[in-house]
Image (cartoon, coloured by chain):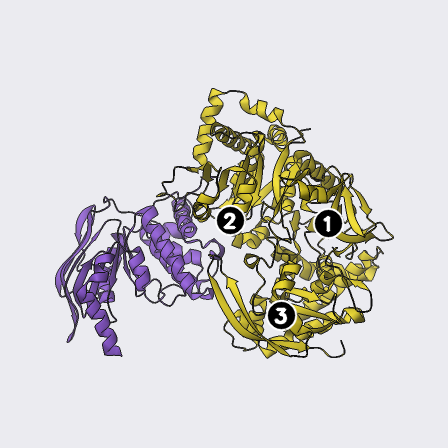
Chain colours: A purple, B yellow
Amino acid sequence: MARGFKHVLNSSDLQPGDLQLEAEGVSLAFGGVQALADVSLDVRQSEIRAIIGPNGAGKTSFLNCVSGLYHPQHGRIRYFNGDEHEVTSLRPHQIARLGIARSFQNIELFKHMTVLDNLMLGRHVHLKANVFTGGLFWGRAQREEVAHRHFIEDVIDLLEIEAIRKQPVGTLSYGLQKRVELGRALALQPSLLVLDEPMAGMNMEEKEDIARFILDINEEHGVTIIIIEHDMGVVMDISDRIAVLDFGSKIADGTPGEIQRDEAVIRAYLGSVAREG
Amino acid sequence: MGETFPQLLLERARELGEHTALREKDYGIWQSVTWDEYLQHVRDFSLGLISLGLTPEDTVAIIGDNRPEWIYAELAAQVAGAKSIGIYQDGVVSEIVYIITHARVKFIVVEDQEQVDKILEMWDDIDGVEKVIYYDPKGLRNYTEPFLMFFPEVEKLGQEYGEAHPGLFEELVARGRADDVAVLSTTSGTTGQPKLAMITHRNLISMGRHLLEVDPLETDDRFVSFLPLAWIGEQMMSFACSLQQGFALHFPEEPETALANIREIAPQSMFSPPRIWEDLVSQVMVKMEDSTWLKRAVYQWAMDVGYRMADVRFRKEEPDFALRLQYWLADWTVFQTIKDHLGLRHIKRAYTGGAALGPDVFRFFHALGVNLKQIYGQTEASGISVLHRDGDIKFQTVGTPVPGTEIRIADSGEILLKSEAVFKGYFSNHEATEEALVDGWLRSGDAGYFDEDGHLIVIDRAKDVMTLHDGTKFSPQFIENKLKFSPYVQEAVVFGGDWPYVTAMINIDMENTGKWAENNQLAYTTYTDLAQKPEVYDLVRDHVLSANEDLPEAARIRRFLLLHKELDADDAELTRTRKVRRRFVAQRYDHIISALYSQNDAIDVETTISYQDGRTANIKTQLKIETLNGG
């Protein structure tokens, strides 16, 4: 019995530490609201890159620019995987094909489909069968399906969801649904994994589980991860570098140690507490 | 006929070579290992351990879920003339340290990162351990400790060693003797630290042979190995019986998927402690309660027929034609489906052992047509000494002794056993050995007697039998099992020995009671909260009252309460095989018990509970005490 993983869940061909994503002067406005103002940041291969900031700081907007849901009015985002790709104005499915996978703040799964089907759906970009060969299923389409299922089983093993493989997603607890959502993003075999608050609304135990899975994905498979998270304890524990946004601008960038000591960050966080109080 | 496990393995591999010996669900698919491959793994791993310095004086500890590697590791140790010891993987650190140091363990074989982390945590306390070998590398890539090794690495060393020393493996296997210690088995020890029973090859093999004499299995039968391999019952089936008979073992994908995997495999034989059977009954009952009225009505009718049929068979009478016809119909419409869902469709024989199973659970399975039989035995007698024969089942008894086992009742009422399967003694614990073995007779510590048909009746642990206020002797376990038949009762502890009447502390079953609460629009937050709902008290009271109906006047429960926390092995309230450690519980809940015998109808409690990771928390609450009228 072979143990361990049979596939590498990471599809990037860069060396750890290479520049993987670079945003330069990204600005985004909705009418009069400036969501992002001249944000520049880089992401390097195989790191866990956290983006933090108070509510409304522009974190999710930034991720939406990266994954192509929004297109910034100024600035550009470049992605390196094999070649250099300008992703600033690409559509989401084109970006997904480059290997950027994301999970959402709210669960975006097909509730009536099983966990397995939801995960297989994540393989969709890699599927080569078309309506006709797929409709017949025999031959190539079948072989392809089996190969993808193999890959999915590695994801299932990694996330320890064997027991719920065939359950409809809608019947699962919130924590497990979030885990499946993470699995769906992994099924893409990403070169860059973008996680928008993967632990929101979880209890201590579920958070610890997810944090462990994120570390496994990163350390075991070398997948680069961009994560937005509000739980400072977790962020400080697992990230390699942290960028801090406040009112759409980047106010700090550095290692967890540097961020904890940063005057501007302390002011932004304490300030926001003072405003709310 | 081989006299040690490795010799048996060699025989089976010669005979069955390409047949499947082991199957494990991996990648969502059942993956097979043939007898040849099985032997190859054992050969490589044993030679690998020998090249790393394993000698016959050493012990190999194994911690992990049931996997082929677990099996290879045990046999590999035995090839070298050494012994193995299985350690329950949910054991707390202090317990594991105790076992490892006392068993003089040199190598530890573990499953994955979780266990490696646990071992690293205790590393400074476990002198003498030289290597820790893991077989699931997930998450262990960046571990640099020099004593960590990956299972295939050891196998590779073994291959090289085998090439350098041709014939060594066969020579070592041939050198094994029946009276060599095969395994050390931790006894659940209802008091204090576990004891390590030395079980020889002769013990296990003779017991397996006698069991197969009574209940033969076929080579192509299937068995699912899902209970801890550290437990003697699993040692018996997965090693002693499988190696003699050659039937294939099946390992579940994960512990959580065990019941689903059993359904897929539909085994011919199954051996579980009462808890599993009780859970299966609860599962059926709860599902039926969720069902439509029509299905419920059909189910009720079928169960009624089933119970009548079971009772006729228990009386060893012939069912009349009308009953046979009805049963056939009930079987066809209802029982087949239920059995299919439980994975019991092909079962030839199912066993329960380790503790007493309530008569109601027995009748339930026999009504379904599942041939469930009681086993009586203990670790020190390699698992089985007494069991029911097919067609001769009395659920108040544990059956008749297996061939080759002599049983005598001491003047004190204690059951004494003598057979080839009785163990050699406790490892480096002479005192305990002398206490347990008297002139070759094993003192079981249980009180019992033979009935008119030669069936052994086990009353209870001798020290647990209570004398009621009217002078009759009574087994608290009997009452507890009555209570536990309710799907809403997880665990019950009954008191009454030195008191004027009988009382009970009850644990509700969180899952089933929670579901019931949901269906009845009852909001709750935690276990403690749910347990103290008046509606839940009413629910449990009805079950206690119906249990009381079957009990003699003096044994009826007068007062009970629902505990605020589940009894837990981590708090030392249960043994690792989930038996209540009665004395410890009595001590720990002393104040609650006094309250049960006071005039008060509530009691304030404050307890510390310990979590899996060693953290502790305090719970403060008030428990209601329910008094039942008329007793």
Could you give the CA–CA distance between mark 3 and mark 1, rounded to whole angstroms? 34 Å
What number of labels is visible? 3
| Residue A21 in view, yes or no | yes
Give the foreground label among 1 and 2.
1
Q: Amino acid at mark 1?
A: Tyr
Label 3, residues with CA under 10 Å away: few <14, some 14-19, many ≥20: few
For disc 3, the chain is B
**Left or right: B611, with B142 as reference point:** right
Q: Are marks 1 and 2 in contact (CB under 8 Å)?
A: no
State the SS at label 1. Answer: strand
User: Looking at the figure, which quarter contains the N terminus of chain B?
Assistant: top right
For image coordinates 35% across by 43% down, the residue present is: B142
Instruction: Provide the residue designation for mark 2.
Output: B253
Q: Are marks 3 and 2 on the same chain?
A: yes
Point out the tag, 3 or 1, that comes first from the N-terminus.
Answer: 1
Point out the tag, 1 or 2, that comes first from the N-terminus.
Answer: 2
Outermost residue, front direction? B431
Q: Amino acid at mark 2?
A: Glu
For disc 1, the chain is B
For image coordinates 20% across by 66% down, the residue present is: A265
Instruction: Provide the residue designation for mark 1.
Output: B376
| Residue A57 in view, yes or no | no
Instruction: Provide the residue designation for mark 3.
Output: B591
Q: Amino acid at mark 3?
A: His
State the SS at label 2. Answer: loop
Where on the picture, by quarter, is residue B275? Answer: bottom right
Q: How far across and down, in percent of the image, does residue A267 sit?
A: 19, 70
Q: Is A54 situated above or below B448?
A: below
Give the foreground label among 3 and 2.
3
